[in-house]
Amino acid sequence: MVRIATWNVNSLRARLPRVLSWLEATRTEVVCLQETKQSDLNFDPTPFEALGYQVLHHGDGQWNGVAIVSSVGLSDPIAGFGRADLEAGCRILTATCGGIRVSSVYAPNGRALDDPHYEVKLHWFEQLETWLRDEGLVDVPHAICGDFNIAPSELDVYDPQALVGMTHVSDKERAALERLFSLGYRDAYRTINPEQQGFSWWDYRGGAFHQNHGMRIDLLLTSPLLTSRVTEAAVDRAARKGEKPSDHAPVTISLID
DNA sequence: ATGACGCTATATTAGCGA
């Protein structure tokens, strides 16, 4: 059995103690991190290695930044979409862990429907789709894990009415996700839990977590060869509690061998 | 509620997140 988790940590520097204690407590085999907010030059693998993990980091400064932490091997990395001219802010990193291709992704936010960043977001998903096709990744065991900044359906937000006209729930964003499903990928949490709400992000403001005013935007998309192996999918709400939490909780899937 | 909260940068406010 192998577990794969995804966790937007909102600064790995600020969250390092929590991330390390979570790894120690759960011993999750593969963990994809997003928003490390570090450059590769400043990234220190030592504390992960001290716990028996390998780690790869892809970041260039203050914003974004993704990493993969693994105790079951970490090889054949691809940073970004594999070409410097396609790079868009260090938002995707791929490697092989225990025979599974694993991508840690941090999709652009979009900000607002009438903001230029919204088009950047949609374009990034087009690039992702093209890259997945070119690499043929849907035909191998592959998990795309990360903060997609899209809530797949109305079930995945606390109040659909309150979010009309906002990003994360628009038709174009959801269509971008649907195109990944059309390739053959599946939303592992929703496949295992067809009707259960499993929010993974709650705003820091306004007591959103305690009111469970959240969204499910952190997803693990599995290729067919992996979907058939998924036995569990769960959000670790406890990791959103306590002192200095990220505004995201980790989401974990379990795979049979 | 043009709000809240938290993180970062050669900072003492502004940009960004979702």
Image (cartoon, grey):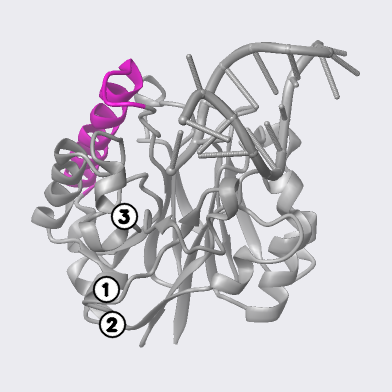
The segment highlighted magenta reads A112-135
**Chain ID, mark 3:** A
| Residue A233 coordinates in the image, percent (x, y) | 38, 77
Q: CA distance from mark 3 to mark 1?
A: 32 Å
Amino acid at circle 1: Leu
| 2 or 3: tag closer to the N-terminus | 3
Q: Residue furthest left?
A: A182
Rendered image: mark on residue A229 = 2
Quadrant in the picture for residue A52: bottom right
Amino acid at circle 2: Arg
Q: CA distance from mark 1 to mark 2?
A: 5 Å
Determine the secondary structure under disc 2. loop
Residue bearing the label numbered 1: A226
Residue at position x 30%, y 43% in the image: A163
Rendered image: mark on residue A159 = 3
Q: Nearer the viewer, mark 3 or mark 1?
A: 3
Mark 1 vs mark 2: tell me if same chain.
yes
**Chain ID, mark 2:** A
User: Could you classify mark 1 by the number of other residues whose Cα lies within 10 Å: few (under 14), some (14-19), or many (20 or more)?
Assistant: many
Determine the secondary structure under disc 1. helix
